[in-house]
Image (tube, rainbow, N blue to C red):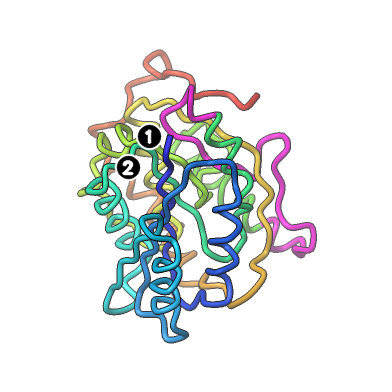
Amino acid sequence: MRITVIIPTYNEAENLPKLVSALFALPLDLALLVVDDNSPDGTGRLADELAAQQTGRIRVIHRPGKLGLRSAYLAGFKAAFEDGAQTVAQMDADFSHEPAALVEMAARLESCDLVLGSRYVPGGRVDEHWPLWRKSLSAGGNFYARTILGIPLRDVTTGFRLWRRETLLGMPLERVRSGGYVFMVEMAYLAYCLKYRVGEAPIYFADRRWGKSKMSFRIQIEAALRVWSMLWVYRDLRRQGAAARLPVAKHQ
């Protein structure tokens, strides 16, 4: 099973070569799809150099500017489908997501349609050096989103995910409008509404090793408001009553 890993980048020149090495060292059949938003630090040029060294294993999409996470992933999904990808992964370029976790996530996908790399199931955790306020913000954001939307998942904001091709093709991607990390919430909510089997594999979420975080207060406010609007926007997909709900795949 070849996994196409989509990696959106903006100023990740310090991280990308190390991430490529770590991914290709895994006992998995991987292809990488780098979606670069014209990074001023030369990430796109570096990605081209890495692609030349790994013929047929790395593809680079160059975009004219910083267009956001949602459009980066939608462009990546489209390109992955065109390349015939059967399995698609989403992950950050900054080593917040441990590449080795893909191995367990791939094993879990055998019985699921979507696997989330989860910080909040048994065995999952966040960076031990985070201050209490940051841990509370992360856990609270998850609780807020999954409670409002009624999703029985522990980590709906995680950006570390593994999809079956058929699952992504069955998603109404043209309706997805969220930017920032709430894009992840919207995609998880859609998968749940469409009754896909969603599993969670424990991950350790580390603080980025190099570079600067792209999280902002504006993004957090957008997320808080957008979660409520999803209830209305996807009212046609919401299941009617608890009896209609199928259980999600449990962590084992």
Q: Mark 2 points at which residue?
A: 85
Which class describes the residues within 10 Å of circle 1: few (<14), some (14-19), or many (20+)?
some
Q: What residue type is labelled 2?
A: Ala
| Residue in the image at 31% along x and 39% along y | 168
Above or below residue 22? Residue 10 is: below
Above or below residue 90? Residue 67 is: below
Query: What percent of the width, then of the height, locates residue 46?
Result: 45, 77
Q: Kindly indicate the quadrant of the structure image that contains residue 21.
A: bottom right
Which class describes the residues within 10 Å of circle 2: few (<14), some (14-19), or many (20+)?
some
| Residue in the image at 22% along x and 48% along y | 82
Q: Is residue 121 left or right of residue 15?
A: right
Helix, strand or loop at label 2? It is: loop
154 or 241: nearer the viewer: 154
Query: What percent of the width, then of the height, locates residue 59?
Result: 35, 61
Farthest residue to the top: give it.
243
CB atoms of marks 2 and 1 within 8 Å? no
Q: What residue type is labelled 1?
A: Arg
Numbered mark located on residue 208 in the image: none
- Where does the magenta region start and end? 108-136
32 or 174: nearer the viewer: 32
| Residue in the image at 25% along x and 37% along y | 169
Q: Mark 1 points at which residue?
A: 164
Does the segment drawn in magenta span residue 132? yes
Does the segment drawn in magenta span residue 173? no
Above or below residue 100? Residue 130 is: below
